[in-house]
Image (cartoon, rainbow, N blue to C red):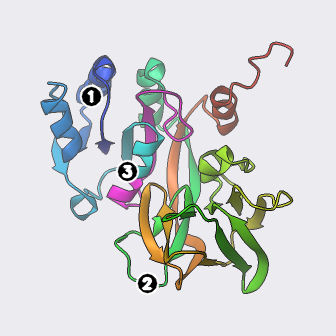
């Protein structure tokens, strides 16, 4: 068996967990294809030498024989792993090195148990939809898919944006707002949630359209089926606005429209036995902390 390991930065306090993690694979004689920048960080910053068999630098030299991808970090690192590796045939496992995440939800306390369950096949696969975005112009973004959301935001002054949203060519609404988010079910627990959007389960076949600080208080988030094409026409004072895919952003001219559809690819994520979206939701949002519940 061969697995890939992706990471960015972890705190020195996480070294004992890393030792358990890499020792497990060494003992099980499982090959590790390790991300080179993460290897460099562990060697140079933490003075820790991890077990590995091969190295990769990006999607161009990623070993397609890998059966799993382990992302070590938080949800941001998980998103970065998708952008860096770009292989939708290999399921991704999120190992959390800090606070509990929605994507990186395997905690350090259960790392060995979770690894044993996953390697032995005692786990479930969740397929997550992605957004495919056509910016209508050449941009510096060479990867036009997003796992969480696509966002438009004002950039060069304090004036709000006017955002016309069309669903399959039919006008949904003219939004006057600081911005707008189009989120997948996965992204419904990220930026969209923080500005009042609803939570969707990962298997929901929908997108969430959530305005950011709308001028009209009657405007509310709306859920639409993900087989629709969503078109955004953005205007405002100045010349440009900011558009982002997950953590990557680019300045765009007001003269360009944006088209958003569901990608033909889905991202496979792994949950070991005993894990579920609802359990993670309760823990992350601290539901039930009030004993009256």
Q: Earlier in the sequence, mark 1 or mark 3?
A: 1
Instruction: Label 3, secondary structure: give it.
Output: helix
Q: Is residue 99 located in the magenta-colored stretch of the structure? A: yes
Residue 116 can be seen in this image: yes
Q: Which residues are magenta?
A: 81-106
> Residue at the location (52% across, 75% down)?
238
Bin the neighbour count of mark 1 within 10 Å (Cα to Cα): few under 14, some 14-19, many 20 and up: some
Q: Is residue 134 left or right of residue 174?
A: left
Q: Earlier in the sequence, mark 2 or mark 3?
A: 3
Q: Gap between marks 2 and 1, in whole Å? A: 44 Å
Q: Is residue 76 located in the magenta-colored stretch of the structure? A: no
Q: Mark 1 vs mark 3: give the one in front.
A: 3
Q: Gap between marks 1 and 3, in whole Å? A: 19 Å
> Residue at the location (15% across, 39% down)?
40
Residue 81's mark? 3
Residue 97: name its quadrant.
Answer: top left
Up the image or down, 72 lies above or below 155; here it is above
Bin the neighbour count of mark 3 within 10 Å (Cα to Cα): few under 14, some 14-19, many 20 and up: many
Callout 2 touching callout 3 (CB < 8 Å): no
* Magenta region, main secondary structure: loop
Q: Gap between marks 2 and 3, in whole Å? A: 26 Å
Residue 254 position in % (x across, y down): 53, 80
Residue 137's mark? 2
Residue 293: name its quadrant.
Answer: top right
Residue 68 position in % (x across, y down): 38, 46
């Amino acid at each position: 068996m061969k697995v890939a390991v992706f990471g960015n930065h972890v705190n020195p306090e996480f070294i004992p967990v890393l030792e358990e993690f890499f020792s497990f694979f060494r003992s099980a004689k499982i090959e590790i294809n390790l991300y080179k920048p993460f290897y460099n960080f562990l060697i140079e910053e933490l003075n820790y030498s991890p077990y590995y068999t091969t190295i990769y630098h990006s999607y161009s030299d990623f070993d397609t024989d890998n059966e799993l991808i382990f992302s070590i970090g938080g949800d941001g690192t998980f998103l970065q792993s998708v952008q860096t590796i770009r292989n939708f045939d290999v399921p991704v496992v999120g190992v959390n090195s800090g606070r509990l995440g929605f994507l990186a939800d395997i905690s350090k306390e259960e790392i060995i148990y979770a690894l044993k369950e996953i390697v032995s096949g005692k786990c479930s696969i969740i397929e997550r939809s992605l957004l495919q975005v056509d910016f209508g112009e050449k941009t510096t973004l060479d990867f036009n898919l997003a796992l969480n959301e696509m966002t438009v935001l004002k950039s060069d002054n304090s004036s709000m944006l006017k955002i016309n949203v069309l669903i399959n060519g039919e006008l949904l609404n003219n939004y006057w707002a600081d911005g707008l988010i189009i989120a997948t079910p996965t992204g419904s627990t990220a930026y969209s949630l923080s500005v009042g959007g609803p939570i969707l389960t990962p298997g929901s076949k929908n997108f969430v359209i959530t305005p950011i600080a709308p001028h009209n208080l009657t405007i509310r988030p709306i859920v639409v089926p993900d087989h629709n094409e969503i078109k955004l026409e953005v205007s405002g004072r100045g010349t440009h606005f900011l558009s982002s895919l997950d953590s990557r952003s680019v300045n765009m001219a007001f003269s360009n429209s944006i088209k958003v559809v569901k990608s033909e690819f889905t991202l496979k994520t792994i949950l070991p036995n005993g894990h579920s979206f609802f359990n993670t939701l309760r823990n992350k949002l601290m539901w039930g902390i009030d004993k009256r519940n």
